Amino acid sequence: MIVLGHQNPDCDSLCSAIGLASLFNKMGKTATPALQGEPNPEALFLLEQSGLPQPEIRTEVAGEEIFIVDYSDWGQGTADMKKATILGIVDHHKLGDITTSTPLECWIWPVGCSATIVYNMYKFNNQVPDAPVAKMMMGAIISDTVNFQGPTTTDIDKVAANELAEIAGVDDIEAFAAAQFEAKSDIASVPAAELILRDQKVFEMAGDKLAIGQLELTSLDTALSKKSDMLAEMGVLQAEKGYHSTIVLLTDINKLDTVAIIISEDEDKVAKALNSTVVDHTFDLPGVVSRKKQIIPFLQAAFEAE
Ligand SMILES: [Mn+2]
């Protein structure tokens, strides 16, 4: 069995795949974690901290048995995923469009991180993750919940992260989180074309496609200095893919605010749905850190109202 994360692998996609494959191995099932691309710098930081090898990259899964983590829509899977047997789903996003022809195991909880669910699967099965795996899963929870400050954070996430920290031998979660966030904020040498794709997800809303990426940063200065380069690359992508909008959310994880940059067929419609106003391809989203909770539902409502 392959445990497969989503496209543009983030911490959760990586760590939940590793955590779940390891759980299956403990229970005597053969399972291999896999990614659909190179992990982002924050995910690489966690691999480095835990000393675990980077999982293999798989973009073809036809004929395989797979368990998917951190998504439940075809669009986030491989192009050939309909030709695989989906044995199960672990996710914490809104329910996607995947259907199966055979029964499957579903663990979909409204918590801050898929790794929180995977840890509870360990408990359900009376298993304990190995220390390096626990460290990965703790890091994923820190990442997805923005160190427990984000609006998707639940008590279940806090309990899981604290227990995982103990298993991993991490005494100071705050210090670990600070180092982790520094790693993901190091974007000075990252080309604009790569930055705009980081953590990008494509959402379909009433027939329109909106590509929305997110950079979570300890300061927005470096990102804003690259704004014109990013807008140029976003324009290229927008034309190539026929998106309604291409958006990059620049989220300040210290101030817990977001500045969005946008190329769009109708930028005012997008900004208005989020109670903001566009000036020079940019709009402010004070107090917004969560794409899934504070952005997508409002855009969906505005697009589907027409
Ligand atoms: Mn996640």
Image: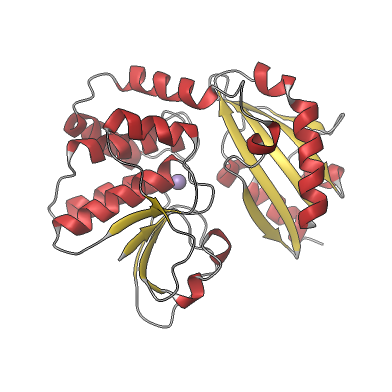
Locate residue 94, reporting x and y percent: 52, 57
Placement of the N terminus among the 4 image quadrants: bottom left
Near-viewer residue (18 or 128): 18
| Residue at screen point 79% across, 35% down | 231
Q: How is the image coloured?
A: secondary structure
Where is residue 50, by image quadrant? top left
53 left or right of 244 in image: left
| Residue at screen point 80% across, 31% down | 282
How many marks can you see?
0
* Residue found at the far bottom of this picture: 101
Where is residue 209, by image quadrant? bottom right
Placement of the C terminus among the 4 image quadrants: bottom right
Near-viewer residue (7 or 305): 7
Near-viewer residue (283 or 22): 22
Q: Is residue 160 visible?
A: yes
Identify whether 114 is placed above or below 193. Answer: below
65 left or right of 204 in image: left
Locate residue 266, reporting x and y percent: 87, 48
Locate residue 162, reporting x and y percent: 25, 31
Locate residue 167, reporting x and y percent: 17, 34
| Residue at screen point 38% across, 38% down | 140
Q: Is residue 88 visible?
A: no
305 left or right of 15 in image: right
245 left or right of 49 in image: right
| Residue at screen point 52% across, 63% down | 78
